[in-house]
Amino acid sequence: MKKIAILGSTGSIGTQTLEVVRENGDIEVCGLAAGSNISLLEDQIREFHPRIAAVWSEEKAEELKERISDTDTKVAAGMDGLLQVSTLADMEILVTAIVGMIGIRPTIEAIRAGKNIALANKETLVTAGHLIMPLAKENRVSILPVDSEHSAIFQSLQGNEKKALHKILLTASGGPFRGKKEEDLLEIRVEDALKHPNWAMGQKITIDSSTMVNKGLEVIEAKWLFGVDVDQVQVVVQPQSIIHSMVEYVDGAVMAQLGTPDMKLPIQYALYYPERRNLPGERLDFWNLRKLEFEKPDMDTFYGLWLAYEAGRKGGTLPTVFNAANELAVRLFLDREIKYLEIVEIIEDCMQAHHNIENPSLDQILETEAATYDRIHSRR
Ligand code: NAD
Ligand code: MG
């Protein structure tokens, strides 16, 4: 039995991870953590019998404790709960399916405790990749990508020499507003931005996909996962989301991973790597597929992607500013406090005002996050 724990078990990636666990039947779930949906968490506890369940909200944790007092599952709360789940004895793989920079500390502590990481939580790598990747190496743990593009890149790198890699072709669907110009985006409502053409995901990443900030985060994520410069990562719009990403080698050969859009494939691949398991689901039918389209991304309209390249090139605390400003701006947009186009305006403003710190410590990253939030709040 493989032993895993999941941070963010009630979310889009978390629930699909549990589907993979259910379908395979040979994985033990040692720990689960969620934000506040204790009803779903209770169902998951009753089905998977983890040793510990963590809830972010103290109040909800108390409520859960009462509800499951007939089980053997221990309940913990807050950051302490996340850290307990992340470092559980004899757990082998931590699935980081939580949203945002809150995942940094649990990921770092899991690596220190020798756990392999199945990483969905890209914000953590974007902001602290320079700390996480060397730490993983030092502790001989693997960081296995769950993000579909990075899984595709990882799969396309199998069996080839790392030094022969010339560039990464990171595909993007282009989101719901592909082809639109700034003037078309002035009155975008939350409902419009939450309609992704190909993927059903959590709210934050769905908004990020619509602004292409998600692709920007993924460019920086690729930099850390695969040890390349951001300028070796070329974004290619592939509207059907059939090609999940590609790599080009020095001899011009391009390797790609294709498939119907289904996050269970990268999740399962990360959990069983290097083994490939059967996965039920729709297969690609090339006779009916007929065509695949490609476009250059419009970085004038979707300049959040351009800002990400800038942040990725300069490094230091700038990617933290990019990410933290986006996290708060997306929350404000979802709460209908700002307009759609203000999301990227806020990111740009915070990046312009920032004095970059090279090679920041974890404390400096967290201070930068707090300072970015303060700036946004103080200007409103
Ligand atoms: P989601 O909003 O659907 O789920 C997030 C989960 O994290 C929930 O279980 C929530 O309760 C939990 N959570 C949030 N804050 C928490 C806290 N402070 N403490 C404990 N738990 C907390 O999000 P998602 O779409 O599953 O995305 C998760 C991560 O995976 C994100 O970083 C996202 O960018 C990445 N990702 C998602 C997809 C996808 O298809 N959904 C694809 C690629 C990458
Ligand atoms: Mg992705």
Image (spheres, rainbow, N blue to C red):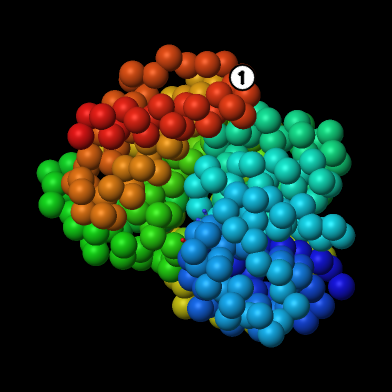
Q: Residue at x 68, y 30 (%)?
A: 131
Q: In this rendering, would 45 be left or right of 320?
A: right
Q: Residue at x 66, y 80 (%)?
A: 69
Secondary structure at numbered mark 1: loop
Q: Identify the image quadrant of the C terminus.
A: top left
Quarter of the figure with the N terminus: bottom right
Q: Amino acid at mark 1?
A: Asn
Q: Examine the image and state in which quarter residue 227 appears.
A: top right
- Residue 325, compared with residue 90, is above or below; it is above
- The foreground one among 256 and 371 is 371
Residue holding disc 1 = 359
Q: Is residue 181 above or below residue 9?
A: above
* Left or right relative to 173: residue 271: right
Q: How would you rate the neighbour count of disc 1 (Cα within 10 Å): few for under 14, some for 14-19, many for 20 or more?
A: some
- Determine the image quadrant of residue 221: top right
292 on left or right of 87: left
- The percent position of residue 101, horizontal first and vertical second, equals 52, 43
Q: Residue at x 61, y 42 (%)?
A: 104
Q: Is residue 297 visible?
A: no
Give the percent coordinates (x, y) of residue 24.
75, 79
| Residue 271 image point, x, y percent | 74, 63
